[in-house]
Amino acid sequence: MNTIQELLEGYKKKATQPSTVAGDFLDRIESTNPKFNAYLEVLKEKVIARAKELDGCAGQMENLPLYGIPIAIKDNILVKGWSATAGSKILEGYRSPYTATTVERLEAAGAIVIGKTNCDEFAMGSSNESSAYGVVKNPWDETRVPGGSSGGSAAAVAANLCLGALGTDTGGSIRQPASLCGIVGMKPSYGRVSRFGVVAYASSLDQVGPFGNCVWDNARLLEVMAGFDPRDATTSQSTVGSYTGRLNSKTLNATTIGVARDWLEGVDPEVLKSFEAALATMKAAGAKIVDVAIPHARYGLSTYYILAPSEASSNLARYDGVHYGHRAKGVDSVESLYSRSRGEGFGKEVKLRIMLGTYALSAGYFDAFYTRANQVRALLKKDFEDGFQKCDTIAVPTSPCTAFRIGEKVDDPITMYLSDVFTLPVNLAGLPGISIPCGLDDKKLPIGLQLIGRSYDEASLFSIAHQFEKLRGHFPRAGAK
Ligand code: GLN
């Protein structure tokens, strides 16, 4: 049983029970996680106890849309009693005193939290190499990165160490690793999902979203966790409804797909070939393909790298050795307590971003950088609004390249940042985006197609993605190339 949908069917037919399933996953994690380093914490006893409790709830299965489904949670999302390192040394040993709304909703629906997954430090990165707990290996090729920052969650799903996972996406951190690991990953519209209990990186961009092996699984996870939360003032009151129930609501012959040709500069030829083939497949099924212009997409990267570090520099001020996190020993003043605790606890990339952000926000530079970046952000939003006058979804590759080698881009931050050229603008505009595997390159590494949707129209986006998935047919699993 490879998907959430199949396992739910299996439970219905009484073919298995949660404790058996959880036991199988725990065994696989024990034997293969040391190779992949996808999980940072698996509290076996807790998992077993929870699964047994669910064995006794089989009668209520109908009311539990995620009954007995093992889910992995990125280690920047809080689950009471579990670790929440956010991939940083500064939060080593921290135990969450409460549970994030998203996880609370998954658990109320019958899900089993199976473990906490590795990620780039404070979700800053595109390869998982900035984690203080070591890189995650891509299950398709262990010499390569899984993408980031939610690399542990993506690798755990791809390696069959859970059936679904949560990640966070500030600039691409769900969609890019989903693409590099050959699975489906989705970033909802800004405000669709609660961030209560999520370690903040850049608050005007952060969203929580699902990973899974197919669109149906993503739709199920999102319909369970989305919606208004009184504990997060940015969540929308608009109704969620059933996403799985509407997967066939949008047929391809009633769909117009926008392609922004200018945006496609610099894409790896293999990725481009596969992207064009995906468009051709949808066209043959009746979709209309039109050109759209997103002229400010080219400024997405520079805009993001002003705004995200600025917000991060403020959000990360709380890790000072007093409020939260590691406290330096043997200090003789408050100032050295702060500077030494932060100096010892944060890694290189995080320090770089804090410095960038502090600089951009400083008096004299604020207008030139932060205000300007916000103006460009507004223009980019307008580009998408105009684009969506002409189409129902905008298609781009998720990532300009497939999984790169571990170490290949660590010394070149600009090349690393370029991994996100197709994902960052979507966060800046607050739109939903989904990555679906659409092919393999000549090295047999997965390629992802990204579909971008209208604000709050996750239902249509899932439906279009589902139609494409059906046309594409079976996609190989990692290790089964
Ligand atoms: N790779 C981008 C960054 O480093 C995006 C990360 C994310 O979405 N959390 O900031």
Image (cartoon, rainbow, N blue to C red):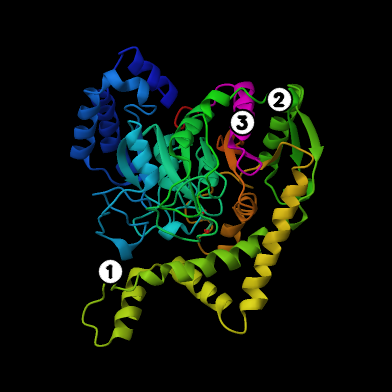
Three-letter code for the amino acid on which mark 1 is drawn: His
Q: Position of residue 96 (x, y in %)?
A: 27, 54
What residue would you read off at disc 2? 252
Q: Residue at x 70, y 66 (%)?
A: 375
Label 2 secondary element: helix
Three-letter code for the amino acid on which mark 3 is drawn: Ala
- Which residue range is magenta in the image? 449-477
Let me know if residue 163 is in the magenta part.
Answer: no
Label 1 secondary element: loop
What residue would you read off at disc 3? 465
Which badge, 1 or 3, is on the more N-terminal residue?
1
Badge 2: few (under 14), some or many (20 or more) residues near its Cα, within 10 Å? many
Q: Farthest right residue?
A: 291
Q: CA distance from mark 1 to mark 3?
A: 43 Å
What residue would you read off at disc 1? 326
Query: Is 129 on the left-hand or right-hand side of 246?
Result: left
Badge 3: few (under 14), some or many (20 or more) residues near its Cα, within 10 Å? many
The answer to which of 266 and 236 lies nearer the viewer is 236
The answer to which of 30 and 236 lies nearer the viewer is 236
Q: Residue at x 26, y 34 (%)?
A: 26
Q: Farthest top residue?
A: 13
